[in-house]
Amino acid sequence: MPADPVDEFDACTVMHVDLDAFYAAVEVLDDPSLAGRPVIVGGTGTRGVVAACTYEARAFGIHSAMSSVEARRRCPHAVFLPGRFSRYTEISERFHQVLNGFTPLVEGIALDEAFLDVSGARRILGSPPTIARAIRQAVSDELHLHCAVGVARTKLLAKLASRAAKPTASRSGTRPGPGVVVIEPEKELAFLHPLPVRALWGVGPATGNRLADLGVVTVGDLAAIPVETLCRAVGTANGRNLADLARGDDTRPVVAIQAVKSVGHEETFASDLHDHDESHRHVVRMSDAVGRRLQEAALRGRTITLKVRFGDFSTITRSHTVSHATDSPRAIGAVAGALIEGVDVSPGVRLLGVSMSGLVSGAAVPQQLSFADAGPTATGGTGAFDDAGSAHRPDAQVTEYGGGRSDRPTPADIEGHGWQEVEAAVMAIRSRYGHGSVGPGTLIGGSGLGVKRRGDTQWGPSAPTEPDNPVP
């Protein structure tokens, strides 16, 4: 029988579950000697950022997305760890398994957080607050981690409630939070309106500044602004959306399965890249990783996008769309390699990224690719190819999957002729012996084969004493 009646909270069937200080908590779980110490996970180099930290570190004002340099200045005695993405993924999978034991309507939005709809579980498991407490207990029992649960009528309010349920950091010690916060329908506006306006989805720095010009500080201030005024300040769609959120209206349902829209890798370098040879090597490494992830997920894509951020933080993208989807690392590398040749890297490249979008199921009949099928698109500059598919630069070169170079991408490079069996063999070898067992020859360096693994330099480059790409 349910522990308490369900009708009191009948409308509060949406939950947001958020693991506390996830990456740092996993490190403490695996190394109990870190308990009670300020632990910071993220990029340990001068260009790194904080991904997560324990509450002992938060007491010094450290938070996620802060630069590692600033975090080290605030807390020099903190333990800095580069992070282990594969371990966090493993724990995340177990976390989502726990949640699926309560309801099949689980919408994962990050490794450490998810929305749930428990409307169909109330008669068996009890009221939403009862279910929320049971979830916290299950996470503690099975993962030995702590989580906060927000319970409300909508996703926005549930998300804000879980934040209110978390512990609070202070120099005198961590103050435990309530763990579960329930926002009843009649108390929604009393909870929502005193919050800072930037607590709402869609209010970033630029929008926040525009709202500040209107005298908007809190969500309540926003709710008092006429919709027409908001639309003039931030645009029609955003203005109407913010007006709804300020009234507590959020009609988005919990969606259990969401289609993946893109697969990509990007990396910030410890020092700027200034020549095409080195840039090519990194583009091939990322293209290889993108292709591998597509193959593992049984997906193919049509649009390859190159992202380049320069030392002054200006950012451009170059993309090329082909007529038939691919998951071939060699083909992705040929396209991305040609795209980087059309970019002047001499000012210094701080970050490179390669991604694939326009995804379809890999179960579809494989098709061949051609540069002639579609012209490129570009953001922040001109495209990288002319109508014939060659790079604009007369001396353009392309890094092939196998490490060779040619004057322009050949049909064999792009269409993968003769390479399907090779790439299938590469995937089989990696599945058995690890991702670092085989890969493009151009990635061989002094420390071995430097393949890109998911999570490498996820939060910026490591300090010089820690290799960015250790051989598995």
Image (cartoon, rainbow, N blue to C red):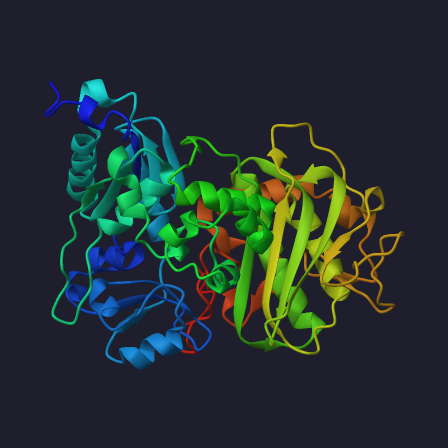
Q: Is residue 166 left or right of residue 70?
A: left
Q: Is residue 323 left or right of residue 92?
A: right
Camera-side residue: 206 or 396? Answer: 206
- Does residue 224 lie above or below 284 as drawn? above
Q: Is residue 43 left or right of residue 340?
A: left
Residue 109 percent location from the top left of the image: 41, 43
Camera-side residue: 168 or 363? Answer: 168
**Residue 399 visible in the current orientation:** no
Residue at 39% across, 60% down: 217
Camera-side residue: 52 or 396? Answer: 52
Residue 438 percent location from the top left of the image: 55, 54
**Residue 272 visible in the current orientation:** yes
Camera-side residue: 121 or 470? Answer: 121
Residue at 78% across, 51% down: 376
Residue 52 percent location from the top left of the image: 32, 61
Residue 34 percent location from the top left of the image: 18, 65
